[in-house]
Image (cartoon, rainbow, N blue to C red):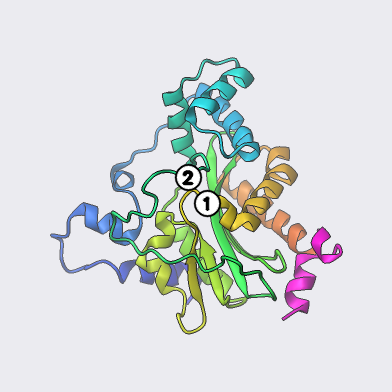
Amino acid sequence: MNANEQVRDIVLSHVEKDHTDIPIVRQCELLGISRSSVYYDPTPVSDTNLVLLRHLDEIYTKRPYFGARRMGHELTTQSGIIVGRKHAGTLMGILGIAALYPKPNLSKNTSDNYRYPYLLKGVNAMHPNHIWGTDITYIRMRQGFVYLTAFMDWFSRYVVSFEISISLDMEFVLKAGLQALTIGTPEIINSDQGVQYTSQAYGNIWNPETTKISMDGRGRALDNIFTERLWRTVKYEEVYLKEYESVREAKQSMSAYFDFYNNHRGHQSHGYKTPAEIYYGGR
């Protein structure tokens, strides 16, 4: 069974297929997707917003702690287009990003999704497959954006797997996770509290006898600092140098880049050995 078939079976296993009276809201919760995506008919992003989104991408990569008000000011300064706080907030929503600062009532759980404790306080990765981290970022193209997820071994910085998607639904995260498990098994897998990671389907791909699930506190992106550094590296060394014309081109380019990153790009903290040398040499 390939990764696509495994993702399908995992998702379908959480839906009562013989009961059509399950509310749409509950079905969406089980599938890990937003209700709006069920009815969503994609519409082109305006040329003006595309320009602003490109500026927003670069500003956020450098200054992820900017809120909508500050982001609106920076967008206006850089683009010459007047952008208010509400417009900036809308643009940030399109990319699925938010300012990285603590917010009130962060620990309050108001959903049925699963939450896991943060297990990495005072813990350092000591060997390959000790700790993996995963996250989602956005990748700009000439016209629009796609989403990128990756699973990375923290000790070696080896990117174990990655996937690209045109939406933030959980299927591409599950596929990347299952692909990663064909290469290794982490003792701890760490993520943020995004809906893709709090779904039962995501929890079910990890064997509790071998892997513990850890989650950052909301507003604490530095808990996943190695993955955040990876995103900056990917964008400055690959994405900002290219103009992807299609999703297919983006996938091919990212595949080539991660091959370079894993197998040819030496890492200073490991004496300029490559992530692959550390990952496979230290197992």
Give the residue type that dot 2 points to. Pro
Residue found farthest to the bottom: 209
Would you say residue 44 is visible in this rendering?
no
Q: Quadrant of residue 6?
A: bottom left
Q: CB atoms at circles 1 and 2 under 8 Å apart?
A: yes
Residue at image coords 61%, 67%: 122
Residue identified by numbered label 1: 220
Q: Quadrant of the C terminus?
A: bottom right
Q: Which residues are magenta?
A: 264-283
Left or right of 58 in this view: 149: left
Q: Is residue 192 magenta?
A: no
Query: Label 1: how many residues lie within 10 Å, few (<14), some (14-19) or many (20+)?
Result: few
For the point 54% across and 56% down, the residue is 135
Coordinates of residue 260 in the picture (x, y in percent): 77, 58
Location of residue 114 in the rendering, given as x and y in whole percent from the top left corner: 35, 64
Query: Secondary structure under badge 1?
Result: loop
Closer-to-camera residue (24/157): 157
Of labels 1 and 2, earlier in sequence is: 2
Q: Is residue 138 left or right of residue 112?
A: right
